[in-house]
Amino acid sequence: MSDSSSVQLFFVEESQWGVTPTNSPDVLSEFRFTNESLTQNIQTATSEEIRSDRQVSDIIRTQVGAGGDVGIELSYGSHDPLLAGGLYDDFSTPVNETGLTVTITLPSPLNNTATLEVSGGSPDPLRNVVVGQFVQLGGSLASPTNDGFYKVTAKGTGSPHTLTVTPAPPSAEVIASATLKGTFIKNGTTRKSFTVEKLFSDLSPLEYQLYTGMRVGSMDLTITPGAIINGTFSFQGKNLTASSSSAAAGTQALSVNDVMNAVDNITDILVDGVPVSDQAACFTNVQFTVENNLRDQPCIGSLALGGIGIGRTNVSGTLEAYFRSRALFEKYLNFDTVSVSFRATLGGNSYLFDFPAVKFTSGQVVAGGNDQDVITSLNFEAKRDATSDFMVAINRFAA
């Protein structure tokens, strides 16, 4: 008998849908997970022949596929290829500039934006910066420091090199030796699929299950007080085969970073670019789901699927906070388009999740009964942001 604590998962991105790559001896990377429900999915048809003895003439398989959910705890660098697979995009070319001179200019009157004039470093230090991404600025000597994470809303062309960013840094400053870094993914159209291998390591001989053509149908993340940040990848794929040997000569660990939690590692929850403290709210739940609306593509003459179709990207989520003022709930009443972002940081490594244009589609502030807190509960759906040209982005910053 196999024990669930002895099960291991591994994965690799495919260059051709349904085909496991073999261009590396260590092709499979460790899949850190908390639970899984991966299995083969079959469809059957029962014969409708009429028999005088009332028996069923035959049952046939009409389609074979694979799929299921894999639960995770968020840790930096552990699931980056799968995050990119869930958004169907590739991480942008990293910005990693040092030795810069950055002049911060604040407008008058103040409007929660600033201009960064950047010189030094490479001939064009902003060549890899994309409008819509967040960049991490370092090297400030001001007090309070201007070091932080800023969203790029505009990028100047020519010289001098300039960025318009939000939120506004605390003060104007000339940073003589600054750093600028960041990379990000956004909802896109790059078709991605994975091979996932399941190993029952306590059996002899070892037992393997190989799932091919696995596309990320949806992914979600949930942040609640006093808990580890949890998420789920839901897969839909081509087929499952069982074997007593692995598909790879070896495996590699993708990350050994600690898991992140909602107590120590969540910072900078912003609504419309304003820190949550200024919104007079204290969040109790932040959750989002990215749904890719996959569909099976069966073919005549083939038991396995001919492909997995990809539909529209739907992004939805929930914000819940203790009711302290009408500021947050009023955005629902007015059906405002707002931006939402939050950052998870551990050991200097960060993910910053950005939803630049959302609508609160339902909301309530109710007294559920005696001896309870009154909670503002808002559900949101994302739409395309005209400036950034995306609905959701995940920014990544290495220590």
Image (cartoon, rainbow, N blue to C red):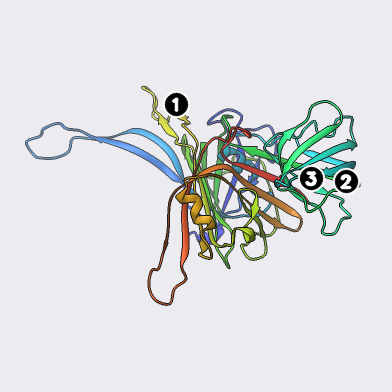
The location of residue 224, given as percent across then percent down, is 55, 62
Dot 2 amino acid type: Ala
Q: Regarding mark 2 in the picture, which secondary structure is present there?
A: strand
Dot 1 amino acid type: Gly
The location of residue 35, given as percent across then percent down, is 51, 56
Q: Quadrant of residue 124?
A: top right
Residue toward you, 158 or 4:
158
Residue of label 3: 106
Q: Regarding mark 3 in the picture, which secondary structure is present there?
A: loop
Asked if residue 253 shows in the view, the reply is no
The location of residue 89, given as percent across then percent down, is 61, 34
The location of residue 229, given as percent across then percent down, is 58, 58
Q: Residue at x 36, y 33 (%)?
A: 63
Q: Nearer the viewer, mark 2 or mark 1?
A: 2
Dot 3 amino acid type: Leu
Asked if residue 280 shows in the view, the reply is yes
Number of other residues with Cα within 10 Å of mark 2, as a class: few under 14, some 14 to 19, many 20 or more: many
Number of other residues with Cα within 10 Å of mark 3, as a class: few under 14, some 14 to 19, many 20 or more: some
Q: CA distance from mark 2 to mark 3?
A: 18 Å
Residue of label 2: 178
Q: Earlier in the sequence, mark 2 or mark 1?
A: 2
Q: Earlier in the sequence, mark 3 or mark 1?
A: 3
Q: CA distance from mark 3 to mark 1?
A: 56 Å
Residue toward you, 192 or 299:
192
Residue of label 1: 306
Q: Earlier in the sequence, mark 2 or mark 3?
A: 3
